[in-house]
Each structure stands twice: as C-alpha cells, then as structure tokens.
Image (spheres, rainbow, N blue to C red):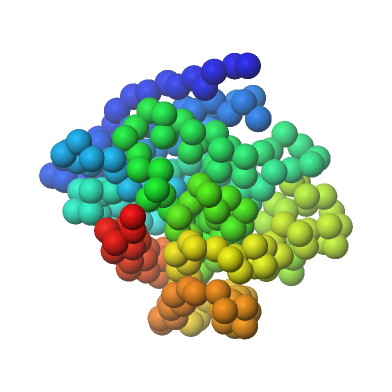
Amino acid sequence: MRILLITLSTLCIGFHAFSQKVDSLNIYSASMKKEVKTLVIRPTSTSGKKTPTVYILHGFSGYPKRTLTQDIPALQALSKEMKMMFVLPDGNYDSWYLDSEIQNSKYETFVAKELVAYVQGHYSSDQSKTAIMGWSMGGHGALYIGARHQNTFTAIASLCGVMDFRPFGNEYGVPKTLGSDPENWKNYTVMSQIEKLKNSSQKILISCGTEDPLIGQNRKLHEQLIGLNIPHIYEERPGGHDAAYWSKAAITQLFQLNQFFIHHD
C-alpha cells in the first residue's frame, strides 16, 4: 500500500501581521492515485494543546487559494484569534465531493478518510473537535459528507448550500460524476441523507441569503429537520449567492463552532 506522500512548502499569503502558518500541501490520495492541493492554516502557538480543526470545502469552480484570498479572507485572523486550524482541500472544480462510479473521482473518500487521517497524523489536530463546512457546492459536500461520517465530524456547517442539485446539475458538472440520468442522482443529494441525522449528536449550522436562488432548498431542509426533531441552527439574512454573503456568514458560523468546541468534551 502506498503511503501518503507530501510535498510541503510553507507560504505566507497576506495578513503577515497575524503571524499565522499557511502550509501549502500536495497530499496523495490512494483512492484516486493523485495528489490533491490543500492549504492548512494553523495558529503559531497553541500552548501544547490539540487544535480544534475545521475542514472548509469551496464551491463550484473554486480552489483553496481563492478561498483564502477572496471567499473567506478573514481565515488567518480567525485562526489566530480562536486558536483553530482550517484545512482547505481542492475539490477539483466540480467534483461535488462525491465518490463516482463512472470515473476515478473519490472526493468523499479523500476528504472524510484520507485527508482527515493525514491531518491527524501530521498535525496536533483534536479529533474530538473536528468540523466540516462549505458554501454552495461545498455546502452540499459538508452536509452530505458530515451526515455520512458522524464519527469523524462533530459539527457540520453549510453556507448557501445546494441541498438538491438535480434541477440544474447538467449545467454544473454532475453528469461527469454521476452519469446523465437525473434519476440516478437522488441518492447523492443532501436531502437523501437527512434520515441519517436523526440520532446524530453533531452540531448542525445552516445559513442562506434571502435573495439566494437556493433559499427555497434551504428552507425545505430546515422544515424537514424540524419535522424530524433534529436540533440545528438555521439562519437567514439579506444577501445573495456570492462571496459578499458567505464571507460574512462564515465568520458567524466559525464563532458558533468555536463556542461549541469550547464547551464540548
């Protein structure tokens, strides 16, 4: 079995005053037989304590550096302030963070198993305080993966998340991963995973802008979670499907996650 390999260089990408470490990694995925670019933002000092860790999944067409410089530019400051580590993997533009049966795309396996194993093996990451969050396609990925890997992620957070990509999947790369028949896509949507959360102890956070085209999907998920008596925090605020919304809403969710971790044993 090939051992995970890494090419590591430490970068300082802006925000020099925050004195944070931003590690640029190429992490080998055995399931896909390729390296995946990943950024790890970590506080320079944690007083020897294990660090709460949040895996952050970008949206359609995104990539880790854009996450750091455009989508959530406050991450370095937040890492320092909250003594929290952020892990930003490359979702390969339009993978939807799914395991594909028709091509060598195993991003659920990579994120939930290979990436987590690497981070926990090479950093002082607190396994009991580990969250997954994302926006748009990444919001889908966070909820989908989080619901299916409850022993790995103690919290799940979605911003402007896609709860059901079937109505527009043809325009956003879904056939490449799941084939051309939308009927075969159903079991890969967030909505298909809700039942798995019925007995979950995970912290669940959902946020969406009131002018976002996905607000209807988010409200539907919220209503179904209520109907199933699944505890969660749901937020709506003015805004659309853009970085202006999720860059601010992400800060709110990260503070909520920080409070959860502080009080979580």
Work out whether residue 31 or residue 130 is closer to the camera in this orientation and state it: 130
Work out whether residue 196 or residue 81 is closer to the camera in this orientation and state it: 196
User: Is 120 situated above or below 96?
Assistant: above
Q: Quadrant of residue 126?
A: top left
- Is residue 1 visible in the rendered image? The answer is yes
From the top left corner, tell me how far across and down residue 36 is, in percent.
53, 32
From the top left corner, tell me how far across and down residue 133 is, in percent.
46, 56
User: Is 58 situated above or below 7?
Assistant: below
From the top left corner, tell me how far across and down residue 155 is, in percent.
45, 58
User: Is 264 situated above or below 3?
Assistant: below
- Is residue 141 visible in the rendered image? The answer is no
Residue under the point 58% across and 66% down: 199
Residue under the point 45% across and 68% down: 205
Work out whether residue 85 or residue 164 is closer to the camera in this orientation and state it: 85
Q: Quadrant of residue 187?
A: bottom right
Quadrant where the image shows the N terminus: top right
Residue farthest along the left direction in this orientation: 17
Work out whether residue 218 or residue 117 is closer to the camera in this orientation and state it: 117
From the top left corner, tell me how far across and down residue 123 is, in percent.
34, 32
